[in-house]
Amino acid sequence: MLRALVFGIFALTASCAGAPPAAERPLEIVLPQEIATLDPRFSTRGHDVKTTRLVHAGLAGLDPDTLAPVPLVAQSWQFTSERTLAVELRPGVRFHSGRPLTASDVCATLRALADPKLGSPHRAVVRAIGSCEAQGDHRLQLTLATDRATLLTDLEVPILRADQAAAAPAPLGGLDGLGPYRITRASPAVVELEPADTGVWPRPRHALVVRSIRDENARALRLLGGRADIAPNALSPTLLPALEGRAGLTTRARSGANVSYLLFQNDRPPFDRVEVRRAVAQAIDREQIVRALLSGRAQTARGLLPHGHWAAPAAPTIQAFDPAPARAVLAGLPEVTLVTSTDRLRITVARALAQMLGDAGLQVRVVSLDFGVLLARLDSGDFEMATLQMPELTEPNLLAWFFHPRGVPGEGGEGKNRARYRDAEVGGWLDAAGKTRDQARRQALYSQVAERMQRDVPVVPLWHEDQVAVVSARAAGFSLSAEGRWLGVAALP
């Protein structure tokens, strides 16, 4: 089937002969999903965040390799006490409109994000900041209301103009930014960006288009026809060898700070029983899927945190492949449903998981849903199993967003605890790890969380996928970051 697919793509390449000369068109990124919002105050989905960070910038950025927070809009910072941070802004920074950035813009943005009336999902990130005091145009002081280990990483949230910080949601953009690009036209399927003369980056050389194309064949065809330049994590690994070297295309790859996992609805039978969840984990041969379906471009998960992460436990914290005891538990249970997105690779992976569980006696029906519909179903609890990914697992405090008891959707808290996992001790450990800046203490707390989740199996960590981009000759210098963001496109010659 793969050979037929590739042959068909090559046969159709001639249909793109009418593409404009490369020098006359913007660079183009192709994605499998549409953009839900270009408003950085409300963006949480991976592609939304990556696109908004081309337009907006925060006090801090993330080092592309270590993912440690580094000054960006801020020129420097210094803790003057355990709860007080003095920040010096980079001089001469202007918004895309030409308006100078001041400390008042920073404080207004942080206050707006923390205001429950705005309803930003990033409220939890800035809630610990008790006060922001402007001390002139280029200096400010942040004082924490409670201890917060992740303050510097939290400051990655984009800064807006003071008069726009609390404005109504702008899903198609329109908010003044500090990033390397500004939006000229936008829809959920196509976002057109032009280089910005202001902000904290040098002016990019090329304009940029971010285009959503749901069909994988069409994405590959657009690359081969010279109409697109970068496909970041947008093509099946098994297709990559056939594209390498064709029409000047090359593949760039590196290990990724993410985790793909199998999500259970822990409130719904049969997955309200830990022995069933554990048996499912034992029935999955993750290494075989990585080899066969991901072409080895992933690392089998030892837990939720990526290999080598400073907070990851030294020993594996998930069940090894062991189908015999799994079959004794799963055989005879009623058929269950596994929901996934409409992406071809995700459907293929879901079917492989269903086959393995079927071999262990549990019949599984795979249902693919539009990504927005999928997330809505997960938030409402209307599912039994699902495949999902944390695309930017950089700071381990993110685990609190997904597994703290107060984060169950629909129960009045903040978070996306879609597993409905309600271990109070885990919640306490996550809270403690989020408050102390003692890294050894944090590591010990996250190890306790991992050990308890190994016992309870609210989800099954599967693998950490490589960051992989197929690039054209024009974008050959595109550099990938560990969390998969696209800021490297701004530096292309």
Image (cartoon, rainbow, N blue to C red):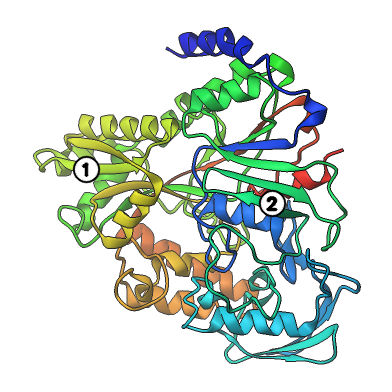
Quadrant containing the C terminus is top right
Mark 2 element type: strand
Could you say which quadrant of the image residue 92 lies in? bottom right
| Quadrant containing the N terminus in the rendered view | top left
Secondary element type, mark 1 = strand
Q: Can residue 425 be seen in this view?
A: yes
Residue 483 in sight from this viewpoint: no
* First in sequence: mark 1 vs mark 2: 2
Horizontally, residue 269 falls left or right of residue 4, namely: left
Reading the image, the residue beneath label 1 is 337
Amino acid under disc 2: Thr
Decide which of 81, 439 is in the foreground and name it: 81
Which residue corresponds to the image point at 78% horizontal and 87% vertical from the top-left?
Answer: 140
Q: From the image, state whether disc 1 or disc 2 is nearer to you.
A: 2
Towards the viewer: 431 or 455: 431
Q: Where is residue 378 in the image (x, y as percent from the top left)?
A: 31, 56
Badge 1 amino acid: Thr
Quadrant housing residue 379: bottom left
Q: How far apart are marks 1 and 2 (CA)?
A: 42 Å
Label annotation for residue 202: none
Of 383 and 445, which appears nearest the observer?
383
User: Is residue 30 placed above or below 186 in the rendered structure?
Assistant: above
- The image position of residue 235, as x and y in percent, is 54, 30
Q: Name the residue under label 2.
A: 184
Tell me the residue at 55%/34% (across/down): 234
The percent position of residue 294, horizontal first and vertical second, equals: 50, 30
Q: Residue at x 54, y 52 (%)?
A: 46
